[in-house]
Image (cartoon, rainbow, N blue to C red):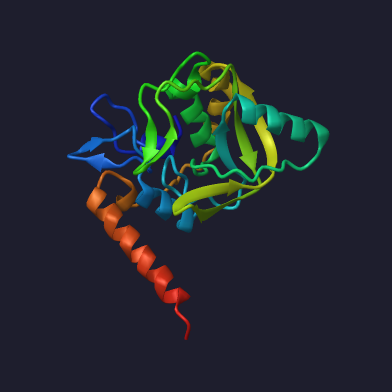
Amino acid sequence: MPRAVAARPRDQRGYPVPAITPWQDEVPQFAELSAQRMFLCAVQGRCTVCGLPLGDEPVWRVVDHENAELVAAALTAGTSLINEAPAFEGPAHRACALYSAAVCPYLAGPTARRSQAVSIPNLVIIDKGEARGPAGAVVAFDGCRAELAHGKLAFFYGQPVDMIEYQRGDDLLDSLAAAVRGEPDDLPRAPAWLRDDEGAAQQAFEAEVQKITRQAKPR
């Protein structure tokens, strides 16, 4: 397990809770993605899994079978991947993305289906019962920008620079172990507003919006 993920708050079963998962009555709501937390990660360049800064390295994302085929074709041919469709999953560190793909029941199994719809409030991202597909991939991109699309926060990834294909989560364990070994020993702690304090998350979101609003006002 990545060190930054191991330092995350846990649910009652002991599972780490991602930075973008909201909390209600001290219980993580895994079937929801917090728009406020995603916004904070986007504007501050933070990993949506562990909540720590992404830095200058490529950003990583787990993709389904169809996207994996497109990325593989582009990397093999050495051509640009033209994909203007927005993604609603934010970027992560290599180790964090590998960990998510290895342990998430939906991402780890070719026959797995969503037990619940996953959504940002008022926007369904993945329907209940949707299958991941026969394979997937953990893909590195040379960048990612966040924009508002139809009033919702969306992510537009740059060009793929690397990918790790897999069928089952166990296929990624060696890559995950290597990524964890490469982590620095002195990782900081994620801020309180990306942990289990939903009030702090809301306050941080409002403060960031106010800062952006002030910067956008003409002088």
Residue 188 image offset from top left, x and y in percent: 41, 49
On screen, residue 170 versus residue 57, left or right, reads left
Q: Residue at x 21, y 40 (%)?
A: 24
On screen, residue 131 versus residue 8, left or right, reads right
Residue 179 image offset from top left, x and y in percent: 56, 33
From what the image shows, is residue 136 above or below residue 59? above
**Observer able to see residue 189:** no
Q: Residue at x 41, y 71 (%)?
A: 213
Point out the residue furthest to the left here: 25
On screen, residue 83 versus residue 218, left or right, reads right
From what the image shows, is residue 122 above or below residue 55? above
Which of 42 and 15 lies nearest the eye of the viewer?
42
Which of 150 and 136 lies nearest the eye of the viewer?
150
> Which quadrant is home to the N terminus?
top left
Point out the residue furthest to the right here: 77
Q: Residue at x 31, y 45 (%)?
A: 195
Hey, which quadrant is residue 121 in on the image? top left
Hey, which quadrant is residue 119 in on the image? top left
Residue 164 image offset from top left, x and y in percent: 64, 28
